[in-house]
Image: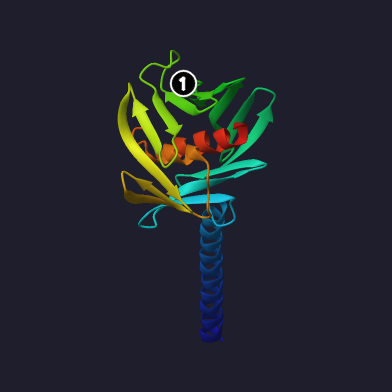
Amino acid sequence: MRKTHIIFVLTLLLLVGCKTENKNSSNGTDTTTSTSASASTENLDVSITTAEGAVIGGFNLSPIKIVANNTNYTFKSKPDKHKFYANGQMKYEVKFKEESFKLRDADSDLLWKIKIYPDKVKISDNEENENAFEVRPYDDKIKVKRNEEELYRVNIEGNSVKVNDTEAFKLSSNQQSYVYAILAIDEIPNEHKMFIIAELLNKI
């Protein structure tokens, strides 16, 4: 009788242990799947990779949604600004004026100021727009200059973005807008590029 009781207790302990392990294992899988899906670029209007296939990010335009640095950003809209959130925390703010907008971080510090002209855009990291990158389309190419010095020559052919005659980026679909030449600017972090390009496409 005592032997039977001991076997029963041991069996019960083994069953409880297996159930707990399976539950923990299941929770871990669900969390990973959820995180991966939330940052996916598969169903976005435009997704962007390097020429080698490494994912940079992407976006929807209406309503606007950004995926960058494997993070999903949603937004809240106000009359003159968009506030972008990740994991429940505000990360970026885009504040608009008639012919410009500013990308700021969570502390409202200026990251980039973008001025929009009829035939070009200028991007700088200061309020005065000094030492700005100028992105301007020409008949057969797009040029990125800074202080009149040509830094990048960009061609957009279908869904391929060539920088200085070398394929550098791939888009998920054919695009025509010259603002994709901003991808060529190494000095702007890829994460910031997603916000700048998406907001520009909504304004021009």
Q: Is residue 172 above or below residue 176?
A: below
In the rendered image, the quadrant that contains the N terminus is bottom right
Q: Residue at x 55, y 22 (%)?
A: 100
Q: Residue at x 53, y 48 (%)?
A: 175
* Residue occupied by mark 1: 110
The residue lying furthest to the top in this view is 128
Q: On the rendered structure, is 79 left or right of 136?
A: right
Tell me: 78 left or right of 73. right
Does residue 188 show up?
Answer: no
- Taking depth in this image into account, of 69 and 113 the one nearest to the observer is 113
Lateral position of residue 101 relative to residue 136, left or right: right
Q: Is residue 89 above or below residue 113?
A: below
Q: Quadrant of residue 94?
A: top right
Which residue is found at the position 47% from the left and 20% from the top?
109
Q: Mark 1 falls on what kind of element? A: strand
Name the spot of residue 135 as percent of width and height, x first.
Answer: 43, 31
Tell me if residue 138 comes above or below residue 122 in the rendering.
below
